[in-house]
Image (cartoon, rainbow, N blue to C red):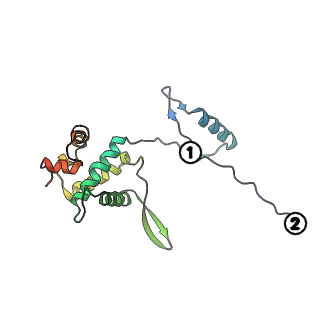
Amino acid sequence: MKIKVEKQPKEVPSKFTGRFSEDGGLSFGDYTRIHLKKFIRENPNMPFELKPLFPESIKQRGYFEGALCPLLAFYQEGMDHRNSKHVHLVREWLKIEYNGEMVEIAGKVHRVSQSTKNKLNLGFLERVTDYIIENYAPPMEAMDPKKYKHWRDAIYPYGGPDNYIDYLVSLKILK
């Protein structure tokens, strides 16, 4: 007895990445260009989505991790902004609260955190900043990215306070 087995679906790449060129076209690497053309030939009339990527900078990530998360830990009762576990808990809570997805498991809805990679400049950082301002009303100097940059570049490397919050306390911006 023969059993008819359908062809296995071809492996589909998750995405093709490239850049817009200056002349208004698209620019891909050699490998991507070859595979994209092959995919187009094999899948005519297939709908697709084209959306821009807004990569975050390392400095923007540093501000979130080094200034905002410790600032929230500083304001939380029972937490210490110097304790990396406490700062990590704050960070995970922020991911769930402001970048979470609702998932139903066994009939019960749970909120699950998603990655914040490339999400900081798509509203996540603004939502976190708004939350801190609304709930704790810190001095605006404490929320200033330029102040954080000054501490990171001019104070910390030369023996100043080893974290941004202690720097703000030493300047009497935070009490």
Horizontally, residue 140 falls left or right of residue 102, namely left
Residue beneath the point at 72% across and 54% down: 8
Within-10-Å neighbours for mark 2: few <14, some 14–19, many 20+: few
Q: Nearer the viewer, residue 149 or 118?
A: 149
| Residue labelled with disc 1 | 15
Direction right: furthest residue: 1
The type of residue carrying mark 1 is Lys
Horizontally, residue 97 falls left or right of residue 2, namely left
Residue 49 x/y as whole percent: 54, 45
Asked which secondary structure carries label 1, the reply is loop
Direction bottom: furthest residue: 107
Where, quadrant-wise, is the N terminus in this rendering? bottom right
Residue beneath the point at 50% across and 34% down: 19
Residue beneath the point at 38% across and 47% down: 122
Residue 85 x/y as whole percent: 32, 60
What is the C-alpha distance between the residues marked 1 and 2?
41 Å
Asked which secondary structure carries label 2, the reply is loop
Q: Kindly indicate the quadrant of the structure image that contains residue 62.
A: top left
Where, quadrant-wise, is the C terminus in this rendering? bottom left
Q: Nearer the viewer, residue 127 or 139?
A: 139
Direction front: furthest residue: 159
| Residue labelled with disc 2 | 1
Q: Is residue 67 above or below residue 26?
A: below
Within-10-Å neighbours for mark 1: few <14, some 14–19, many 20+: few
Horizontally, residue 130 falls left or right of residue 36, namely left
Q: Kindly indicate the quadrant of the structure image that contains residue 135.
A: bottom left
